[in-house]
Every structure is written in structure tokens, then in C-alpha cells.
Amino acid sequence: MKISEVPQDDIKIMHGERKAVYAVDDQGRYTKTTTRGWEAEEIVLVQVIGDFEEKAQECAKRLRNGETSPIEYFMYKSWLDPLTLAQAMGLSRWQVKRHLKPGVFKKLDNDTLAEYARIFRISIDTLRNFPGEE
Amino acid sequence: MAELKQLEHRQYAHCESGVVTALLKRHGLDLSEPMVFGITGGLTFAYLPFIKMTNMPIISYRMLPGSIIKGAEKNLPITFKTTRYREKGKAQAELTHLIDRGEIVGLQTSVYWLPYFPPEMRFQFNAHNLIVYGREGDEFLVSDPVFEHTVRIKAEDLQNARFARGTLAPKGFMYYPLMVGNSIDMRKVIRKSITRTVRMMLYAPVPFIGVKGIHYMAKKIERLKTHSELKYIRLFLGHIVRMQEEIGTGGGGFRFMYAAFLQEAAAILKSPQLEEASRMMTVAGDTWRQFALACAKACKRKEDIDVVGIAQLAKSCADQEKRVYSHLKSMKSNHAS
């Protein structure tokens, strides 16, 4: 990659930051230069975030119908899947799947709820009372 | 041992090679990032179907986290103090103690918990390396090698980042050089490291590592042809690019960094053949960029994704890399010195 070919697509996800990359100058010598991001990385990042967002919206419907627990909703909101969430919690996948049942969720102890809330980066009350009164 | 230098924040292309380069500089060993990456044997290709990240296989273009530190110890007269922790409290106490004593340390962290990262990048990626160089009250001063400027982080956030669980969990991993020697026979170290990388890329005993690994991935892509769900195909291709574009590598980033290493090595060994190998590796990097772009474009398509064409591009990457390693191997056998 020549310095002139280093992508400078000013992608939103970099928020004006620049990254360092190695590229060759006119004499064919490698130098460290910077990039303002590449369209390709933005496409795939926006895609995966969009996928999680879609799952969260679909989950919100089921939540209103009392078919799942807020844990599933916040899982997608935090861009986690059941396996990654289970690992982050130090639990097995089936334990997390159980916690997605509204009945089981209501009986969860404080410590477990607090740990979920920590991982979702929200307060324990938000988690417990979600979606709350609308 | 040389006098310790002030840490000078610089931006690097990759977190672990960046942290190790910066720590060595502080201890008086002035190597470039590509040189550190090259001689520690940082380059690889690995398609790991059994280790998952967001439920997709890990595809790595560089060695597993921690291997640059290990590689530095193995190939250079350097000793690192490395610690993993079971107790969070002890980890923080020791970090605080070291920092207050004026030490500068590297830490493995999870991007998910680093508030200074752009929000869109804060996924559960547990192998990000950064340097802590100071403390002001409840905040640690951080030199993160993939950022242009230094940043700060609250002790609580750093704790979360150091003890994130899951794939490649950092377990509080902390490291800093104890001893850095400076009598190094660079020619010998370079030759040895190239031989090792070539051997792994050409002759790994498993089908998912090295050049074979790239073909393995190409086959997986080809097989998407029969997958009924277009959405899954798009997510899979997107995942491949995300693994390739992983923070701070910019396209075939690790290939370009290795090409930079080969060029520097060519100058040290006065070898036109190494210079040629560097150019060939640049072509490999460019091919990887084409591949990534093709995957990304496919992600935007609503219908008929040409998975065979994309797989073909992956095979071109494999072929070009094979040329590089074969060239490196052939020059080694003609080279008695």
C-alpha cells in the first residue's frame, strides 16, 4: 500500500481519531503514516451493530408480552450474545438462558442482578424495573 | 543496565507490538515497531473454529495475545516481570504501588470497558494492550499505543477492563521489563525469526494455521454457497473483515508491518533478496485489502453474493503469501553465512 492509497474515508465511527499504519513512500520505503479510517471497516461495524439493534427491537416486543426478561434486551443492547454474556458472567450458557425466563428473572438474587447490571453498564434498578411504566 | 528514559507517547499500528516497543525504548533499546513485531514472530494466520468471538470463529492475522512479550524474552536479552491475578484487590494494589514508585507497566485489558474508545468499537475484545505511566488521585494515566494522544481512566473502569471474563480473559495480566540488555546480534536474531515464521506459515501441522489456514478459510467461505440465510452470509463475511481490521491494523495491516520489518532487515543484512521479499509481502497486504473490500461490499448486497469470487480472492492471498515464504526459504538455503 502506497501512502497515497492509505484510506482517508473520515468514517464516523472513528470520531475524528486517526490510526497509525505502515505504507510505502514514493521511493518504496516503509514509513508510519495515519489513516482517517476505511469505508470497509465502517460497513462491517455498522452492519454488526445494526444486527444487534434489530435483535433488541424484536426482543422489546417479546418483553412487553412477558415472554422474556430484561436480561435478553440489555444483552443485545450491549452487543453481547448468550455465549459471550455467559462467559462474562462466569456462568454456563444454560444458566443465562434460564435467567431469560421472566419467572426465573423475578426471583434472581441481588448479587446476580448486580453483576448483570455491571456488565450491561446500567444500574440495578434500571435492570429490575425495565421497561417500567410507559 | 541503561538509565531509564521518560516515556514518550507515540502512536503505533498495533497494541501489543506498540506497548512492547515503547517499554523497550524506555529501557534504552531503540527498535522500531515492525522490527519488534518481526523478531518476536508476531505474524501468523489462524482460523480457530473452536474459539468463538460473538459466536463466530476467531480469525487471527497475528500470534495470540502475549506472544510478542514471550517472543521478546525468547529472542532478545530481556526479562519481563509478568503477573496474572486471581484477586482483583491485589492486582490493583500492586499496580498502584508500582506506578507510585515510578514504574511504567503494560496491561492486558478488554476494550468493552475502556471509556475512551469510540463507543462503536467497544466490543467484548479482551486482548487490548495499553501502558499505565502515572496516577492522579483516582485516575490512571494511560498511553494507549493505538491512540494519538495520552488518555486517562478511572481506577474502577480499569479494574473492570483488567478482569473481564470470557475468551482471552486478561486475568489482570501486567508486565514490565526487569532487565534489558543491549548487546544484540541483530543479524542472527532476524535470521532466526524469519526461519521460524516461514516454517510455521508453510508447515504448520494443523490445517487451520498458516497458508493452509487461509485455504481453510477460503473453503469455509465457498461453503456459504449452500447456506440458506443471506443474512448469516453477510454477518460471516463482515466478521472476517472485522477480525482483519481489528483496532489499529488498517487493512492487511499485519502484512504491511511485516513487509516493513523485512525491508529493515534487508538493510541490516544488506540483502536485496530480503528487499524483494518485502515487496512481495506488500503485494500480499494489498491482496488482503482487496479481499476485505470485496467482503464489505458483499455485506451491503441484498441478493446474490458471489461467495466463490470472494473465496478466490482469499486463495490469491494464500498463494501470494506462499510465494513470499518460499522465496524466504530458498534464500535461506543459498545463504551459508
Image (cartoon, coloured by chain):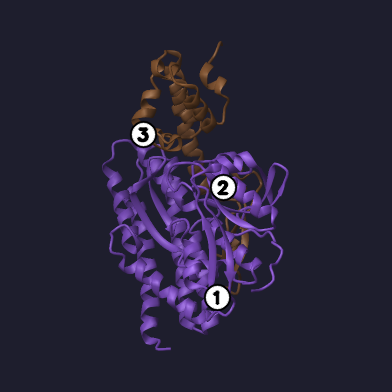
Chain colours: A brown, B purple
Q: Whole-percent x and y of residue B231?
A: 37, 36
Give the label on residue B264, or none.
1
Q: Please, which chain is the residue tagged with disc 2 on?
A: B
Seen as rendered, the residue at the extreme bottom is B336
Looking at the rendered image, the disc whose residue lies closer to the viewer, 2 or 1, is 2
Q: Earlier in the sequence, mark 2 or mark 1?
A: 2
- Within 10 Å of disc 1 (Cα), the crowding (few <14, some 14-19, many 20+) is many
- Residue A3 visible in image: yes
Residue topped by disc 2: B91
Looking at the rendered image, the disc whose residue lies closer to the viewer, 3 or 2, is 2
> Which residue is nearer to you in this view: A25 or B162?
B162
* Left-right relation of B45 to A43: left
> Which residue is nearer to you in this view: B189 or B220?
B189
Query: What kind of residue is marked 1?
Result: Glu
Q: Please, which chain is the residue tagged with disc 3 on?
A: A
Image quadrant where residue A27 sits: bottom right
* Left-right relation of A75 to A32: left
Q: Whole-percent x and y of residue B202?
A: 33, 68
Quarter of the figure that contains the N terminus of chain B: bottom right
**Distance in Å between CA atoms under marks 2 and 1:** 39 Å
- Residue B324 visible in image: no
**Distance in Å between CA atoms under marks 3 and 1:** 48 Å
Residue topped by disc 3: A92
Seen as rendered, the residue at the extreme top is A133
